[in-house]
Image (spheres, rainbow, N blue to C red):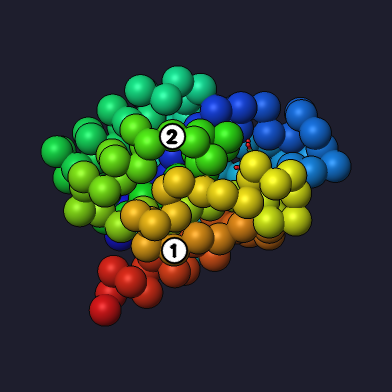
Amino acid sequence: MKFLVINGVNLNLTGKREKGVYGTATLADINAKISAFCAQNGDSAEFYQSNIEGELVNKLHEAFLNKTCDGILLNAGAFTHYSYALRDAIASIDIPVAEVHISNVHARDEFRHKSVISQVCKGVVCGFGSASYIAAIVGLKETLTK
Ligand code: DQA
């Protein structure tokens, strides 16, 4: 299976910003861990990061129109909490999307408790650091093999 891992706004600074919240692993470290996990299971992963909302929407459209992957992991960063454009893009495509967060958003600021994308995602994983992405792959695989 092929997974597309999309990270949104500010996630390029992972491992460098707010280390007490997001840890010290960089996005490259996390992506390497995902690649290794996928390889163990005969799967593969493509990675994309952008700080620009419309580029994330374009990437979702491209995956759908060109059938580039079987499942998508999306850590939209703060866009999670207010981007109706991302929500509509996820609802527009027939590829299952897993919402992922490094931190436990429910144990943080009130504004992070609301996600406008959860409703249109297959599942949500948060709070396990880089392992949130791995858990999301396990969940998507289960969904895709049923
Ligand atoms: C995040 C949680 C969001 O609330 C925050 O805006 C981020 C990262 C996470 O991975 O924990 O940028 O998505």
Q: Which residue is mark 2?
A: 83
Q: Nearer the viewer, residue 22 or 124?
A: 124
Residue 38: x and y, percent? 45, 58
Residue 45: x and y, percent? 40, 48
Tell me where residue 28 sits by quadrant.
top right
Residue 32: x and y, percent? 57, 45
Q: Which residue is mark 1?
A: 123
Q: Nearer the viewer, residue 6 or 101?
A: 101
Q: Residue at x 76, y 29 (%)?
A: 17
In screen coordinates, is 123 left or right of 58?
A: right
The first of marks 2 and 1 along the sequence is 2
Up the image or down, 10 lies above or below 87; here it is: above
Q: Is mark 2 within 8 Å of ligand 1?
A: no
Three-letter code for the amino acid on which mark 2 is drawn: Ser
Quarter occupied by the N terminus: bottom left
Tell me where residue 85 sits by quadrant.
top left
Up the image or down, 121 lies above or below 74; here it is: below
Three-letter code for the amino acid on which mark 1 is drawn: Gly
